[in-house]
Image (cartoon, coloured by chain):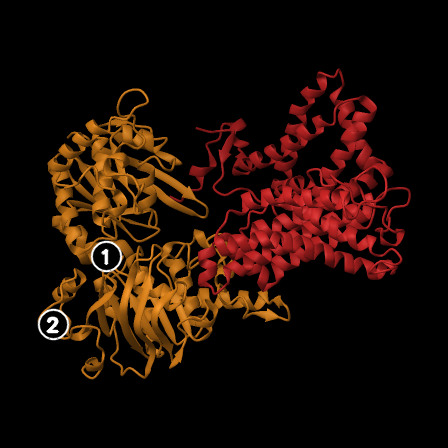
Chain colours: A orange, B red
Amino acid sequence: MKHTLEMRNIVKRFPGVIANNRVNLTIRAGEIHALLGENGAGKSTLMQILYGFHPMDSGEIFMDGEEILLRSPKDAIALGIGMVHQEFMLVRPFSVVENTVLGLREGSGPFLDLQRASERLKELSNRHGLALDPAARVGTLPIGVQQRVEILKLLYRDARLLILDEPTAVLTPQEKNQLFAILRKLKEDGRSVVIVTHKLGEIMECADRVTVMRDGQVVATREIAATSEQELTRLMVGRDVNLRANKVDQEPGAPVLQVHDLRVNDESGREKVCGLSLEVHAGEILGIAGVDGNGQSELCEALLHLRRIQRGKVLVNGGEVTHQSVAKHRASGISYVPADRRRVGSVTEMSVADNAVLGLQRKYMRGLFRNSSEARKSAETLATRFGIRSSGIDQAAGKLSGGNLQKLILGREIMRGAAVLFVEQPTRGLDVGAVESVWQELLAARKEGKAILLISAELDELLNLADRIAVMFEGRIMGTVETATASVEAIGLMMAGIRPSETIAVGPTRKELRHGETL
Amino acid sequence: MAKLFERRLTPADSPLAVLATTSAAFLAAMLVAAFLFLSYDASPFQAYFALFHEPFATLRGFGYALVRASPLALIALGTIVSWRSGFSYLGFEGCFVIGAAAAGWLALWTAPGLPIGPIPFILFLPLAILGAFLAGGLWAGLVGLVRAGLGGNEVLISLMSNYVAIFVLQYLVSGPLRAPGSLPETRLFPRTTWLPFILPGTRAHAGILIAIIAAVLVWVLLKKMPLGYELIVTGFSPSAAKYAGIDVGRRLVLAAFFAGGLGGVAGLTEVLGSQHRLMDGISGGVGFVGVVVALLARLNPMAVIPTALLYGGMSVGADAMQRRASIPSSITFILQSLAVLLVLAFEALRYYKINFGFFRGAPPSVVEQVPK
């Protein structure tokens, strides 16, 4: 038993919560260990303690039976513990090799020996099947490859234990399979891998053992062979969750949002949305599938005029809003739940109450002044109706868990009573319980007759919620399918840019796609 | 395991804790600065007595403290408006000078035969405040426009604009507004344009009242008005502000305008309240000290007046100390700067609490609170 890692009785407190309450975790040499739990269950905290990011309040960590002290990530790296964060820590204009040696002293004296480093990188890359070119600029690499650069960085530092935080959140199915293959190779090499995740399917697919956390405590550790998705779900949330949304059939109404031949550029002037047309009806959810970075964010931003529209038209309830200000867009009946909850959808430094009126700051007025008692009352209503767990509406929004923050934003946008709702990656990084409640709220909004444009990289989410799914690839819609008759394979192919020859509908034309009759 | 100082999870932010750490920082600064007095063979106790006795225990000194505090407070308020809106403006020296020039020019025009002509003070004051506010506001607003429209760096541009403003004033007092005589300065303003003195027997003028009113207005703006909410959202997160339908560019320009306006009014209190004429070099760094006052007041408009008074009072005391004990007043500037540094550094102390159980050998409280 080489390189066993054991965490004993770890206690870590944050304001108002015990993030880790006497947690025990053992990671064996040469295993892939999944750490499963809802958001706020304490799994990230535990891993950050292991990586030396946070000091623990009490507890012990042993490596091969000897107690170790982790004061900083530097200590962790020296002991062979490495972490790949959800957001990569890469310098985009640097090459792979430059990123790898960053923070190390390679070469002699003040000079870098990148040549030698490159050779070692190549060797490591070949041995572990990473297929990386040391000279490539990181900024030009796809996300999945960037992740491999992060893994390579750890291998270069000879990490024996690799922690991956939500590694598959941004990957295509193909990239995901590649990642799992790499992880298996690392395992054969005798290294240990911890993946922090809440995706059960992936755990079943690649892990050897799984430890489930809930409310800061370890609920159970299981061999994968001896457990099931149902059991893990139950352990994780403490109850059985129905992750099949109960979508009621309903006849969609008149078209509410119409987009014609939209063209949008990104900051560097490249066209990211290339002549896209779509139509969303009242009481309908139109899903936009696609791998991140294929123009979905630009589409959303353009629809709210956060980004300039080069060409095309946007109509809400028949009225053109294309080039009007964001405030006018909002007034015309558009609500938007952005993907970036912490920087766009909310102001984390401000209280829950203040965030509940973001975008509505001129609605609650008493003469010239803000009517803060009215605003607070509506914040209370919002918190109650959407079940936002906080220590009160004066708590800073940044201290809410991801799920609660998302409920706050979603609730605010729904309660505005807008006719159109753009929802971008609404459940990214959320735990099962929060996903369920977000889904319920979206379906409730659909029932109320809102026209919903749901942009998601999670196919599962789209299949559960959307009435129709349009697949976006490189700024275009590859095809639109009725969810009821859609095949996952066909959608997957379209996400990869392959226009299916035999799919039901091809191209962005919408006329022949009158939907709903069969649902 | 028990430690005397235990780390807290959130900083203690009760008024008492803030007061305690701030006082501790001041005491520490005074302790360090005390060593500087020793080289002058002066007793630190006597020196400190002189430093605080003059401004806070003599009427005359207190009057001077009020005079110094008024522009500092107004500039600090301007700093709060701009910085909380995410606009790192540092051009208050320039706004001060431009505002002073505007107010001075208007004051000179009230002489008989000139465009305004003799008018009563009650009419002149609003006119002058408007003029100084507009002048300072437009001066800073230009920087705001550059930042919002072209994405320039406001720190750099505003710092540079200070020099331009100072040279503009130099030009005015040595050219068009110069009074006959040898010095580059204007004539004395007509008496009817002077801010009234408010404490008999002192030089204290109504500028401090203007500053107090401004403090209340800034507080109302930021706390009670939707515009203030929008400014603060813009300051915290421009992307969230845009998302909320707030026109970030316009808000930045507006914040710059308000900030510069307050800086301009600060110039007004100086020339109409104590100099009563325009001359070169009237600003003397007040535009930067005001920023420091705002930082010391933790960007809270309600804390600005006492902080400015303390700061102004200390510089009055420093002058007295220099006159009486020949101790250079620069020691006081060292003390003031140390105080700022330590007040900011001592923020960290609020993350700790003293564990009295340490003396009894009790275990740390953190573990005690973990439920079984």
The residue that label 1 is drawn on is A233
Image coordinates for residue A229, horizontal then vertical, percent: 18, 56
Q: Nearer the viewer, residue B118 or A120?
A: B118
Q: Nearer the viewer, residue A217 or A446?
A: A446
Q: Secondary structure at mark 1?
A: helix
Q: CA distance from mark 1 to mark 2?
A: 34 Å
Q: Nearer the viewer, residue A416 or A220?
A: A416
Label 1: few (<14), some or many (≥20) within 10 Å?
many
Q: Secondary structure at mark 2?
A: loop
Which residue is at a point 50% across and 56% down the rendered structure image? B149
Residue A277: which quarter of the image? bottom left
Q: Badge 1 sits on which subunit? A: A
Q: Is residue B212 above or below residue A305?
A: above
Instruction: Indicate which disc residue A503 carries.
Output: 2
Disc nearest the viewer among 1 and 2: 2
Q: Badge 2 sits on which subunit? A: A
Residue most toward the right? Answer: B201
Q: Is residue B158 above or below residue A100?
A: below
Query: In this rendering, does residue A204 appear at all?
Result: no
**Figure quadrant of the N terminus of chain A:** top left
Image coordinates for residue B281, horizontal then vertical, percent: 73, 38
Q: Is residue A279 left or right of residue A14?
A: left
Q: Is residue A1 left or right of residue A80?
A: left
Earlier residue among tags 1 and 2: 1
Which residue is at a point 26% across and 23% down the rendered structure image? A107
Query: What is the three-letter code of the residue carrying label 2?
Result: Thr
**Figure quadrant of the C terminus of chain A:** bottom left
Label 2: few (<14), some or many (≥20) within 10 Å?
some
Image coordinates for residue A22, horizontal then vertical, percent: 34, 40
Instruction: Indicate which disc residue B9 carries.
Output: none
Query: What is the three-letter code of the residue carrying label 1?
Result: Thr
Query: In this rendering, does residue B185 appear at all?
Result: yes
